[in-house]
Amino acid sequence: MTVRVHPIVVCLCGSTRFRDEFSEANRAATLAGKIVLAPGVFGHASDPLTDEDKTRL
């Protein structure tokens, strides 16, 4: 039996238009014990980004 020394890291990529799908995938992977890297800003949602935000990102 192999013992994993390092945790599995998952990177969620794609259009931020799919906020609900990102949330579902993030939850499933997190509950499976994985470390999840995912967008933290969803500019397509009801919280639009300013031009300054876009430049900074």
Image (cartoon, helix red, strand yellow):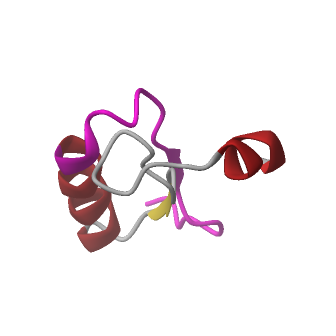
Residue that protrudes farthest toward the right in the picture: 56
Residue 7 position in % (x across, y down): 56, 66
| Badge count | 0
Segment tinted magenta in the rendering: 1-20
Q: Residue 3: horizontal and vertical position, in percent?
A: 53, 67
- Residue at 80% x, 41% y is 55
Q: Quadrant of residue 26?
A: bottom left
* Location of residue 55 with respect to 46 vertically, above or below: above
Examine the structure image and report whether residue 37 is included in the region drawn in magenta. no
- Horizontal side of 51 relative to 35 (left or right) equals right
Main SS of the magenta part reads loop
Residue positioned most to the top: 15
- Give how far across and how far down residue 25 sits, in percent: 25, 49
* Image side of residue 45 versus residue 5, left or right: left
Measuring 28% from the left and 53% from the top, which residue is drawn there? 46
Return the residue nearer the eye: 38 or 17.
17
| Residue at (64, 69) in percent of width and height | 5
Q: Between residue 57 and residue 13, name the one nearer to us.
A: 57
Residue 3 counted in the magenta span? yes
Point out residue 36 in the picture as x, y percentages from the top left corner. 48, 59
Furthest-front residue in view? 51
| Closer-to-camera residue (2/28) | 28
Q: Is residue 50 left or right of residue 45?
A: right
Residue in the image at 43% along x and 60% along y: 1
